[in-house]
Image: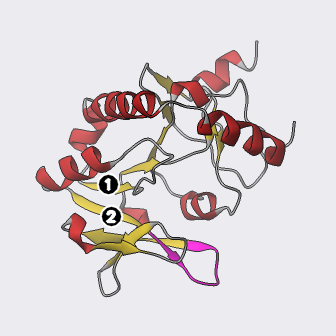
Amino acid sequence: MGKQEKRQEIREKREALPIDYREQASAGIAERLLMQPVFHQAERIFCYVSTEEEPSTWKILNAALRMGKQLSVPRCIPGRHEMEAVRIRSLTELEPGILGILEPRQGLPVIDAYRLELAIIPCISADRYGGRLGHGAGYYDRFLRGLRIQKYCLCFEALLSEQIPMYENDVRMDHVLTEKRIYPAFLVNTELKK
């Protein structure tokens, strides 16, 4: 199955998820991430701003700000299919962007992505080996390519896939985190070779 077919399959599964499952799973995902030592140790965190279909990051964003982290969120660059990390000091600095997703307003400082320590990334689906299926525009893959940064992908357990097709330009996640557990991608080196 190719990526486009996989996206369609997952979108149909996602639409069928009950609202109470999404809410409870989002809360579990946030709690699990906030317990990770890497979250407490990292000073410079990059985190997506969630939409209704994705695991909610609002608790994570609020916690990072409350803990005094240097928090940056993505902003899409019009016409370039690229994104940049923009520092925010309050969630009131977010406004609808070019894709209708909340983004930092203009005039806020852009952060050097190479200085980031932890990236919290969305997906449509992921597998337990760090494979990630996004919306297909490649924004996150282009942004993350070449960065030495801990990459945590948040995914509802109900939307995990057995294996995501990975191509040359795709960036593998270090961990896939669901409401039930964390799948460390180092398993890809052992389990896929069996």
Q: Residue at x 60, y 64 (%)?
A: 139
Residue bearing the label numbered 1: 45
Q: Is residue 149 magenta?
A: no
Q: Residues within 10 Å of mark 1 (few under 14, many from 20)?
A: many
| The quadrant where residue 34 appears | top left
In-front residue for pair 167/49: 49
Q: Residue at x 78, y 51 (%)?
A: 168
Q: Residues within 10 Å of mark 2 (few under 14, many from 20)?
A: many
In-front residue for pair 151/58: 58
Q: Which amino acid type corresponds to the residue marked 1 in the rendered image?
A: Ile
In-front residue for pair 55/177: 55
x, y (%) of residue 37?
26, 32
Residue 128 versus residue 71 in the image, above or below: above
In-front residue for pair 114/35: 35
Residue bearing the label numbered 2: 72
Q: Is disc 2 placed on a helix, strand or loop?
A: strand
Q: Residue at x 60, y 34 (%)?
A: 130
Q: Which amino acid type corresponds to the residue marked 2 in the rendered image?
A: Ser
Q: Residue at x 50, y 70 (%)?
A: 100
Which color scheme does this rendered protein use? secondary structure
Q: Quadrant of the N terminus?
A: top right
Q: Is disc 1 placed on a helix, strand or loop?
A: strand
Q: How many marks?
A: 2
Q: Which residues are magenta?
A: 75-82
| The quadrant where residue 181 appears | top left
Q: Is residue 182 visible?
A: yes
- Calculate the distance from the C-alpha at mark 1 to the C-alpha at mark 2: 6 Å
Q: Is residue 81 magenta?
A: yes
x, y (%) of residue 132?
63, 42
Relative side of 115 to 136, left or right: left
Do the residues bearing badges 1 and 2 touch, measured as CB atoms within 8 Å?
Answer: yes
